[in-house]
Image: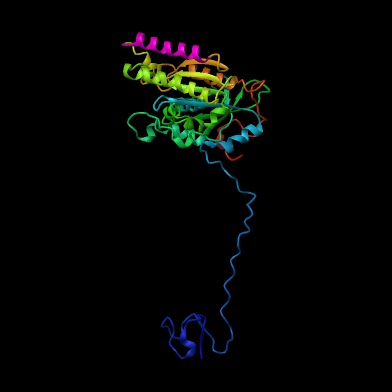
Amino acid sequence: MPKCKLPECPIASGGRCLEGRTDDCPNLLPESSDAVPAPVPAVKEKSGKKDEETLALFSGLPLEIADAREFAARGRAIVVALTGMTESGKTSLLARLHQQFQAGTVGGYAFAGSRTLPRFEELNWLATIESGVGAPRMEHTSRKYDNSFLHFTVLQSHEGALPIDVLLNDISGETYPEAITAESICRQLICLSRADHLAVVVDGAAIANRSLRHDHCSKAKNFVERVLQTGQINKATILHLIITKLDVLSDPAKAEENTAAAARLEEDFTKNFRTKVAGVHTWRIAARPRDGTMPTEESIAKLFATWVGSTRRYDSNPTVLPLSSSRGRDFNEFGT
């Protein structure tokens, strides 16, 4: 009686071929053979041991606090917290820094790496022709990034200079007014307690608008008063007031009035807080001017150099151990 390789085939018991074939069925075994179907080779399970040749790339997303602590362990890092109302210009400032590093040094510092380079690219996406938008704009910072950081490593050009890590904490414009009114929400901004610099960003277009001016200026002062009250900033924190959209503020039709309003805010800011923090700096910038004619690089470069070059949390400027990666495009050594 013929036998079949297929165990469920009834041909061995006098039935018909399972597949309805005749003697040419490839599954039939010779009648005199005691052969049995060859066993299916066992699948070798993976040991779970990581392939030593696998290169783990960083996600490029903003760093969580646990990830950022790596830089504190490696050396001293500069932490800058930026806060302000929605549309105030925080994201535009960060995107502009990224763009200026693509063109060369910024404030005497050269780009030497970034763990969050893809995120910087995302910030600039809606300002590019390729994005397909009708006019350049910036995405709003999500609340989920309130306690996370964008990262730069920078290096001065002189011989023997060591790299410096810069961690930029961008607090959502939606969280900003809530932190003023609710102490519990303010205390959730735990990155502020480690900030070397707190930058309060005020929308210059709001200062130029009489119906918005008082609210935006008051919130800037109230936010600083709140974080002083909670102890999240103190005399180890350097405070910055950054008035953005200088091109709107300088509109010839209302330039005198707008300039006077900005000067009053700067004066109040300095008078109210200079004895309570490590220092107060005021800036007027245009990170993304409307017609592109207003110069932007120099003021932003000075601001960045002040962030990186000064701290009251250490006896000397922060430095870290030398990096092994090159100073070329960071993607060359993105996973190291």
> Quadrant of the rendered structure where residue 288 is?
top left
Q: Give x and y (percent) for residue 304.
A: 53, 21
In front: 8, or 332? Answer: 8
Instruction: Residue 256: say if magenta.
Output: yes
> Quadrant of the rendered structure where residue 74 is?
top right
Q: Give x and y (percent) for residue 290.
A: 36, 21
In front: 159, or 176? Answer: 176
Q: Give x and y (percent) for residue 47.
A: 63, 58
Which residue: 58% across, 35% down? Answer: 68
Q: Give x and y (percent) for residue 157.
A: 62, 21
Q: Is residue 36 above or below residue 116?
A: below
Instruction: Residue 140: say if magenta.
Output: no
For the image, the number of numbered tags is 0
Quadrant into which the C terminus falls: top right
Instruction: Name the chief secondary structure element in magenta.
Output: helix
Residue stretch rendered in magenta on the structure: 253-273
Which residue: 65% across, 50% down? Answer: 52
Q: Which scheme is used to colour this image of the protein?
A: rainbow
- Horizontally, is 195 left or right of 185 in the view? right
> Quadrant of the rendered structure where residue 16 is?
bottom left
Q: Is residue 267 above or below residue 323?
A: above
- Horizontally, is 304 left or right of 18 in the view? right
Which residue: 59% across, 86% down? Answer: 34
Q: Is residue 281 above or below residue 141?
A: above
